């Protein structure tokens, strides 16, 4: 009797299982395998501050329309994530049977982030969820960077030092930076960007801008190495860099007469020889010094020597200048310009020349007057009594 009951129970169980199988087979294929998510790149690498993008397909292999609400889970609130379709934000999607729709998930890696692996998860209802891996390749920062292409330059005190700077905004927002420099007293510092003088610049997030710093030393700057701090700053972030300007010497030249008297006199058509002194008043050697002049018409000015190959710092070289006035020159004051032109510097001197009438012509004038008076006297003597 027990065996019969056991057989009946087993038969009943088999019948029940078969019924469950038939129900499962006859149910519509809605869930597993009919709606799914797909992207070809599930793991990407990026640097801090870099933006990456995932194109994700929602595939409906079923026989009915599938609708799903879309959401995502970012690694943290500082991660900026956008979900769009056709360039517009999207929060829900409907997919026709046997078709697919694409959405885009963009992720901006924050600047302040540790190196490592992070996951962004997209949730799409009946389509399931998709875990996207982001490998941050380096330690992130939140800062500003200021660098120089060539921070050290060398020249003389009358040189102009030009530095090319790069300002990098390593923050997640647009920044305006005030630009300042700390040159020695008497120096001039100017910033320019895009060909215009500026005192501040705007830099977009994760972008750089080129800046030119022009330094003009003081004329009295001694030979030395000068350090000039440069700053780009605002209320939240800043960066600094130090420029070096090496002054190797100063150029100076002086031209005068040996007795420092810049005046002389001569007669019309006469000559005068003057002793000049060309002195190097700087701390660097002068080279290829030539002597030139500007004189009145028909005057002649010559120099001996005409040129000087070099003058060492602090030394003076004598030069003989010969001035010959025009024979037609009238009495009065004239100016003869003298110039000593070196490859590096030049000096000018204005020589006042007073032209006087020749003594010979004075005596000739006296003789003419005497002859005239004598002639008049003779005329009176001869014809006066008549």
Image (cartoon, grey):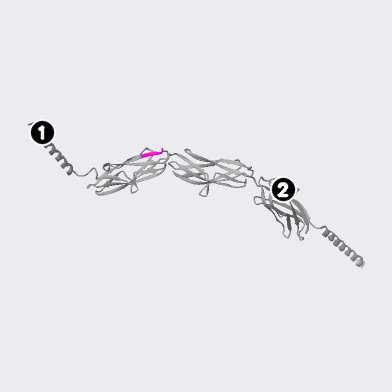
Say whether residue 247 is magenta.
Answer: no
> Which SS class for mark 1?
helix
Query: Is 198 or 219 nearer to us in this picture?
Result: 219
The stretch of residues the image draws in magenta is 114-118
Residue 182 picture location, percent across and down: 56, 40
- In the displayed orientation, state which residue is furthest to the left: 1
Density class for disc 2 (Cα within 10 Å; few <14, some 14-19, many ≥20) is: some
> Real-space Cα distance between discs 2 and 1?
134 Å
Q: Establish if 200 lies above or below 335.
A: above
Considering only order in the chain, which callout, 1 or 2, is on the residue closer to the N terminus?
1
Question: What is the quadrant of the N terminus in the image?
Answer: top left
Residue wearing tag 2: 316
Q: What percent of the width, then of the height, locates residue 183?
A: 58, 41
Q: Residue 145 carries which label?
A: none
**In magenta stretch: residue 115:** yes
Q: Which of the image's four quarters has the C terminus?
A: bottom right
Q: In which quarter of the image is residue 47?
A: top left
Residue labelled with disc 1: 6
Q: Is residue 5 left or right of residue 220?
A: left
Front-most of 3 and 76? 3
Left or right of 101, for residue 337:
right
């Amino acid at each position: 009797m027990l065996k019969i009951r056991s057989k009946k129970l087993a038969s009943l169980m088999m019948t029940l299982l078969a019924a469950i199988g038939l129900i499962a087979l006859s149910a519509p294929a809605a869930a597993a395998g009919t709606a799914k998510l797909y992207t070809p790149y599930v793991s990407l690498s990026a640097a801090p501050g870099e933006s990456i993008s995932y194109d994700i397909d929602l595939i409906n292999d079923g026989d009915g329309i599938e609708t799903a609400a879309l959401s995502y889970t970012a690694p943290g609130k500082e991660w900026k994530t956008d979900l769009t379709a056709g360039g517009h934000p999207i929060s829900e999607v409907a997919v026709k049977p046997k078709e697919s729709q694409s959405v885009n998930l963009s992720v901006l890696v924050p600047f302040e982030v540790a190196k490592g692996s992070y996951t962004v998860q997209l949730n799409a209802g009946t389509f399931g969820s998709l875990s996207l891996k982001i490998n941050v390749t380096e330690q992130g920062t939140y800062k500003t960077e200021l660098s120089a292409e060539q921070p050290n330059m060398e020249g003389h005190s009358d040189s102009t030092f030009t530095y090319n700077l790069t300002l990098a905004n390593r923050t997640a927002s647009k920044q305006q930076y005030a630009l300042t420099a700390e040159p020695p007293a008497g120096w001039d510092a100017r910033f320019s960007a895009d060909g215009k003088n500026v005192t501040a610049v705007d830099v977009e997030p994760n972008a750089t801008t080129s800046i030119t710093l022009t330094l003009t030393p003081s004329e009295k700057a001694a030979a030395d190495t000068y350090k000039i701090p440069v700053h780009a700053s605002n209320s939240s972030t800043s960066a600094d860099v130090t420029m070096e300007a090496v002054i190797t010497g100063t150029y100076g030249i002086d031209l005068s007469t040996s007795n420092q008297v810049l005046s002389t006199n001569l007669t019309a058509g006469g000559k005068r020889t003057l002793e000049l002194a060309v002195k190097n008043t700087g701390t660097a050697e002068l080279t290829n010094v030539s002597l030139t002049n500007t004189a009145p018409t028909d005057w002649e000015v010559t120099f001996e020597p005409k040129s000087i190959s070099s003058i060492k710092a602090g030394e003076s070289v004598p030069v003989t200048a010969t001035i010959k006035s025009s024979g037609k020159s009238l009495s009065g004051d004239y100016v003869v310009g003298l110039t000593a032109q070196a490859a590096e510097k030049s000096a000018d001197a204005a020589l006042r020349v007073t032209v006087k009438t020749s003594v010979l012509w004075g005596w000739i004038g006296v003789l003419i007057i005497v002859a005239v008076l004598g002639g008049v006297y003779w005329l009176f003597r001869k014809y006066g009594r008549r």
